[in-house]
Image (cartoon, helix red, strand yellow):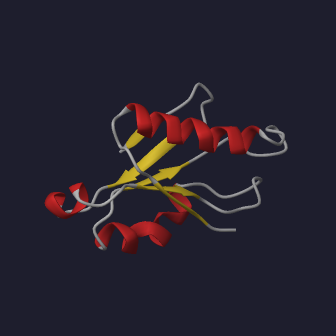
Amino acid sequence: FAHRYGLHPSETLDTLLCDDRNLAQRKPPVLYAHGGAWIAASSACLLHSVAPVARAGFDVFSMDYPLAPAARFPEPVVSVLRALAWMAARGRGEVLLMGDS
């Protein structure tokens, strides 16, 4: 399911929760920023990249963010900060940041 973490329509988090809730509660959640050079791709097309992380016991929040050329630097980086703030506001504490390019 998706959560909105910011005001921009692209600022959403797809969630992959670990099936073992006891294990997931002992591990920090992962915020995943998909690759694509800030211009392409989406969380949905790269969820297969983070499924093994969820199977390893982590709750994964895979973020979408505004893409270039409509979004100019540093907007995608600001979106990462917004997503981290959203997670912190929900008591997630320590968050692991993961991404690819």
The location of residue 66, given as percent across then percent down, is: 69, 40
Q: Position of residue 31 (x, y in %)?
A: 48, 54
> Does 27 sit above or below residue 12?
below
Residue 98, picture quadrant: bottom right
**Quadrant where the C terminus is found in the figure:** bottom right
Q: Give residue 7's quadrant in the image.
A: top right
Task: Report the residue at 35% width, 56% height from top.
Answer: 28
* Residue occupying the point 75% across, 53% down: 38
Q: Is residue 40 visible?
A: yes
Q: Is residue 4 visible?
A: no
Task: Left or right? Give the position of 37 relative to 87.
Answer: right
Q: Residue furthest top?
A: 7
Looking at the rendered structure, the number of numbered marks drawn on it comes to 0
Residue drawn 77% across and 53% down? 39
Question: Residue 92 location in percent, x, y?
Answer: 35, 43
Residue closest to the far front: 94
Q: Is residue 57 left or right of residue 5?
A: left
Residue in view at x 85 percent, y 44 percent: 69
Q: Quadrant of the N terminus?
A: top left
Q: Nearer the viewer, residue 95 or 3?
A: 95
Q: Position of residue 14 (x, y in %)?
A: 44, 49
